[in-house]
Image (cartoon, helix red, strand yellow):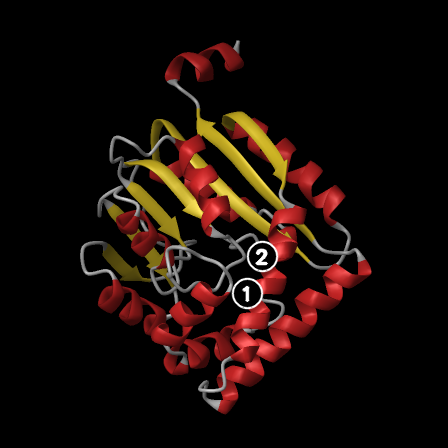
């Protein structure tokens, strides 16, 4: 989830030991009608709004950057959007879980920064991949390379340190260089409310392995303290790749 809370080596160990059945139980207890477990701070209601803005009604080809255990792919199937999804994550254990949970989608283990994407997707998701609210140039470049002309994307970005304003200004400036229809939404209130419910649900479950429960407790402490301090922020960024006409007009 957050690389500054769960470092890369721990991330792999986490995916090797976490239970999808218990993640689903936690999601239900947190009020997710879908009953689909997740390791991001996107509620069912938030994701429904995101999908509406991306207009997924006609079954576009979707890429999920940092797909984890296939939460998005399971959710899209649950809502009837179909299995035309491609998920990429660097944790092999997460990819194994995604393949078990959502066999209708395609999952590949790898690093998005080096994966040879082609412009074949109409929609791109990067849920909580923007670590500490930072929209890495490499992430924007990958989205640009993966989307077809006019394709749309969403990036969700949690931040725990209260220094999000400068990062978001830089991110918007960078996105406007390469994308059109760029919009930043402040979803802090919704994400904070969901985080409180979700972490409470995680910690109420006693059947976790000790190391998994410890990891959830660590994450919960970092996120909930940030919320209490007023440092927590959650941004949702939307945009689209430019058409050839828009690119030519900008170059004039």
Above or below 156: residue 131: below
Q: How many residues crowd mark 2 within 10 Å: few (<14), some (14–19), many (20+)? A: many
Q: Residue furthest left?
A: 104
Q: Position of residue 6 (x, y in %)?
A: 56, 73
Q: Position of residue 151 (x, y in %)?
A: 37, 30
Q: Nearer the viewer, residue 224 or 129?
A: 224
Q: Residue furthest bottom?
A: 210
Q: Name the residue rendered at 24%, 65% in the picture.
A: 99
How far apart marks 1 and 2 lie (CA) works out to 6 Å
Residue 241 bears which disc, if any? none
Q: Nearer the viewer, residue 202 or 142?
A: 202
Q: Which residue is mark 1?
A: 198
Mark 2 element type: helix
Q: Nearer the viewer, residue 99 or 144?
A: 99
Above or below 184: residue 135: below
Q: From the viewer's perspective, tell me whether residue 57 is left or right of residue 169.
A: left
Q: Which residue is mark 2?
A: 194
Q: Name the residue rendered at 57%, 84% in the picture.
A: 214
Residue 52 placement: quadrant:
top left
Q: Name the residue rendered at 68%, 73% in the picture.
A: 221
Q: Are marks 1 and 2 in contact (CB under 8 Å)?
A: yes
Q: Position of residue 96 (x, y in %)?
A: 27, 71
Q: Residue furthest right?
A: 229
């Amino acid at each position: 989830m957050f690389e500054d809370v769960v470092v890369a080596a721990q991330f792999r160990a986490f995916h090797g030991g976490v239970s999808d059945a218990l993640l689903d139980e936690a999601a239900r207890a947190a009020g997710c009608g879908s009953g689909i477990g997740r390791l991001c701070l996107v509620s069912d209601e938030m994701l429904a709004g995101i999908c509406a803005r991306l207009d997924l009604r006609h079954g576009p080809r979707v890429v999920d950057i940092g797909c984890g255990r296939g939460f998005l792919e399971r959710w899209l199937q649950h809502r009837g959007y179909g299995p035309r999804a491609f998920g990429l994550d660097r944790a092999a254990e997460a990819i194994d879980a995604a393949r078990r949970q959502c066999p209708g989608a395609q999952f590949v283990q790898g690093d998005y920064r080096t994966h040879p994407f082609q412009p074949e997707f109409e929609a791109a998701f990067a849920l909580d991949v923007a670590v500490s609210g930072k929209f890495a140039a490499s992430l924007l470049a990958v989205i640009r390379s993966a989307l077809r002309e006019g394709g749309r994307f969403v990036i969700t970005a949690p931040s725990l340190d209260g220094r999000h304003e400068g990062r978001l200004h830089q991110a918007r400036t960078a996105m406007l260089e390469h994308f059109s229809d760029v919009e930043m939404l402040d979803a802090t209130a919704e994400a904070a409310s969901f985080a409180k419910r979700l972490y409470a649900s995680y910690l109420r479950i006693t059947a976790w392995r000790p190391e998994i429960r410890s990891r959830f407790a660590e994450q919960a402490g970092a996120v909930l303290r940030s919320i209490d301090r007023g440092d927590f922020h959650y941004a949702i960024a939307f945009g689209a790749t430019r058409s050839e006409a828009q690119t030519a007009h900008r170059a004039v």
